[in-house]
Image: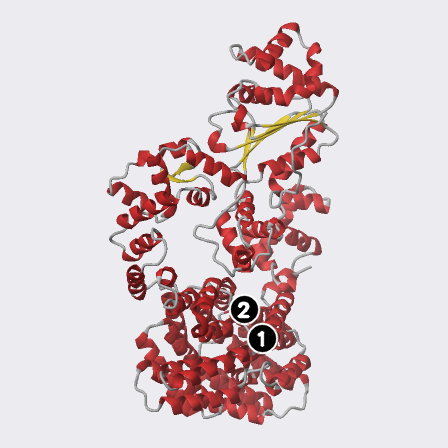
Amino acid sequence: MTRVPPTVTTPAGRDHELAAARRLLHAARTGRSDALLLTGGPGSGKSTLLARAVTEADDLTVLYARAVPEESDLAHAGLHQLLRTVLRYLPRLPAAQRGVLEEALSLGRTDRPFPLEAAALALLTEAAAEHPLLVCVDDLHLMDAPSRQAIAFAARRFSVEGVATLLTADAHSLGDLTGPERLPLSPLPDPVVADLLDERSPHPLAAGVRADLVAAAGGSPGAAVELAAALTPAQARGDAPPGDPPRSHGNITDTCARLLRTLPATARHRLLLMLLDDAADHHDRAERAGLDPGDLDPAAAVGLVRHEAGRPVPAHPLVRTACYHRSPLAERHAAHRALADLYADTPATAIRHRAAAVAGTDPGLAAELAATARTTADHATAALLWERAAELTPAGEREERFLAAARNAWLAGDQRRARRHAQRAGDAADPLTARMDLRSGVAIDAYHRLRAAAENAAAHDPSRAVDLFHQAGEACCLAGDHERYFATVARAHILAGGSAAPRDRILLDYMAGKSAMFQGRHTEGVGALRRVQAVADRLGEPDALVLGVIAGLLCGDHIRTRALAGRAVLIARRTGATALVPQALEFLTYAELWFGRLSLAEESAAEGLRTALATGQENCAGHHRAALAFVAAIRGQEATCRELAGAALATAEAHDLGLPAALASWALALLDLGAGRAREAAVRLRALTRSGPGQSHTAVRLLLTPHLVEAGVRGGLDIRFDAGVAILHAWAEAIGNDTARALVARCRGLLADGEEANGHLLRALELHTSGYCDFEQARTRLLLGTRLRRSRHPGPAREHLSEALETFERLGAEPWARQARAELRAAGGAVTGAEARLADLSPQQLRIARHVAGGATNREVAARMFLSTRTVDHHLRNIYAKLGIRSRVELSRLIDRPAFAD
């Protein structure tokens, strides 16, 4: 007879632990015995693993017991639960053992532990003699002590009986029990917890709510389920706050609340102080304030608190939520007042706790909160202060404070909280929500709302109107609707007149400079935009610095752009303006791409994508996906490029985003150009130059000109390039950037013939030497070397092609490196790159090299190739010698390239 645990589900994220349990079952089936103790806190998934093991042991006799806390003082109660289905084997035991076991199980005698434990071992051995046995005990730490000892005694002595012993326990409550091997259950990865929440939540979860629950669960599946169970439908959608801390509902929460009620008042108070204050210096402050650390000992004794690195911490992720919400209101208020006193030297923290101890409205305290919020540099903290100030403000007077809370929450990157506050702020919040939509919704819709708000503000607040016109203009630019942009800029200048306010001037110069650049008045535009850079540098605010960064990109001042963008990122992080970080990283990425620094561009774009998604800025995420697609195109990572570009294009199409759409299409064209599909690249690029709003952008049409010329010439398309090259030339001369001038010269070289073409390309190389873009310089060398080879000048051709190949390999620009190798071979040059070195290997050596680079050991390679390990060792030494390397790591780096994939 098998006693089955109550629930049987698949333990997500526990492949390692499940594999260990399966090895245990396999050992029992082959007549061997082994034991395993799974340890973890409540809700970590121990019982689910045990249940899964039982379902997979249908060919074994299963003995299952689950500890009952109410029976922990009943000697041998756990042993009786485990053994009662095999008591029919008692007659097979010697009389003495049979007697001691019957006496212990019926009378609970504990004065003869060794004879009893030996008898329990003998009974289990008799049961296993007929059929392999799985002994399962859940929550061993909660069993009565004599039963724990007897089970551990048996587990230590099983050897060849065919018994698998699988136990679970809380490691912190098990004491010094020895015997089975312990396997701790580590916290589950965040994606696994997120999937579990989607599966078990009673209400569909908004993405941000899911992320919050994942963070609060701390990797505990049980905690995640109980947090989700307490959400209302509005909270699950993100329309209502979940509370701080959020509520939870379930067995773990009930257990924590029950243990809390057993504590003396001093311990409950001290526990609440610890749970409400997670500052690193909390315990030091508490001790300086005269609080006795020993007040927490009762909480530690019942398992609500444990010690890490000598400091008390909550023993489980749900201790905070359970103990806070299950404490009487008076005790919670007392804890908040005590913390306000404890943080008297930190005004924002002190007043936040004072406010938490107040019910109803309090205009005086609300005014204090507002005053503190105005002087608080951290936006997340300011948002909390404004929120509480609004809640303590009488109805009818709180809208402005909710609006301030919304603005700070948005800057802090918490868009869900910002939208909740904006909803309570009423119509006054519409410009803010439109600005949020500019980063996450349809760009042209945001334009209409921002333009209307700007017109409404024009009569009574011209500076506010200028800012709103600027935001409306940014929406136009994002959509690629430049005609609307020009009209918006003109309206802003009429409204502002001769305003000398620094904030007005930087916005007006920025709009005027961009408008002039986009209309071809480059010299005029450069003058205005350089003023923007200077003012942005002086102001040092993240949003102003971002304006300076964009101005720098348009002026071709990429060195200063990198500095301003890096500064914007640092200041935004320091002040908690998380929402501004992805945009600053976006333009930092563009600067790195201009320099050809692929690794740095990829790093900033990847971080920008993560932050954009975390802050709900899907449009900004589209920019970063397009930039990452651009990097993948240069590296020849076709699948990655197409996936990222496809995602960026999908967002762009849904939200009318011309700029990321143009960048993504440009990346796909560059992928074609690198792969030798010049005609396809030219068709795609020419379509971009003719596309309208929502599909292209003026800046991209300007910058892709060198690629369009190259693709068109190589693809043999009959395209007129004169106008595009002329605009690129005018821009290059206005900004005075030698790399831009080099690109103009390269275009002219591709469009010319004979010595005139060579002269333009040589001039381009001269200009490249004072620039900073190694990738573009190498591409110019490749084009010049190719032309020289075809005009029968192999010597100079080899020189340029060799240098180009070296640069491409260093940058990881594999498609261009392949082109350079092919041209170099055709010019009679020796290819010394990675591909040439691998070509020196024999077919068998190449197979061995691939296996080793993939992580296989010499023994595994030998088994796969039916060779001896000694032969593989010999070949590997020769491989290292031929390739000029000394380690598996170097071999992996050499082979892990698209050109060398199987």
Closer to the camera in the image, 483 or 842: 483
Expressed as whole percent of the image width and height from the top left, the position of residue 206 reads: 56, 59
**Callout 2 crowding tier (Cα within 10 Å): few <14, some 14–19, many ≥20:** many
Q: What element carries label 2?
A: helix
Q: Which residue is drawn at 34% across and 84% down?
A: 505
Q: Which image quarter is the N terminus in?
A: top right
Expressed as whole percent of the image width and height from the top left, the position of residue 234 reads: 54, 58
**Callout 1 crowding tier (Cα within 10 Å): few <14, some 14–19, many ≥20:** many
Q: Is mark 1 on a helix, strand or loop?
A: helix
Expressed as whole percent of the image width and height from the top left, the position of residue 17 reads: 60, 39
Q: What kind of residue is marked 1? A: His
**Mark 1 touching mark 2, by CB under 8 A?**
yes
Closer to the camera in the image, 812 or 804: 812
Among the 4 quarters of the image, the one containing residue 819 = bottom right
How far apart marks 1 and 2 lie (CA) works out to 10 Å
**Marker disc for residue 655:** 1
Q: Earlier in the sequence, mark 1 or mark 2?
A: 2
Q: From where the camera sits, is residue 584 visible?
A: yes
> On screen, 887 above or below 518?
above
Identify the residue under disc 2: 618
**Marker disc for residue 375:** none
Q: Residue at x 27, y 39 (%)?
A: 291
Q: Residue at x 64, y 69 (%)?
A: 642
Q: Which image quarter is the C terminus in?
A: bottom right
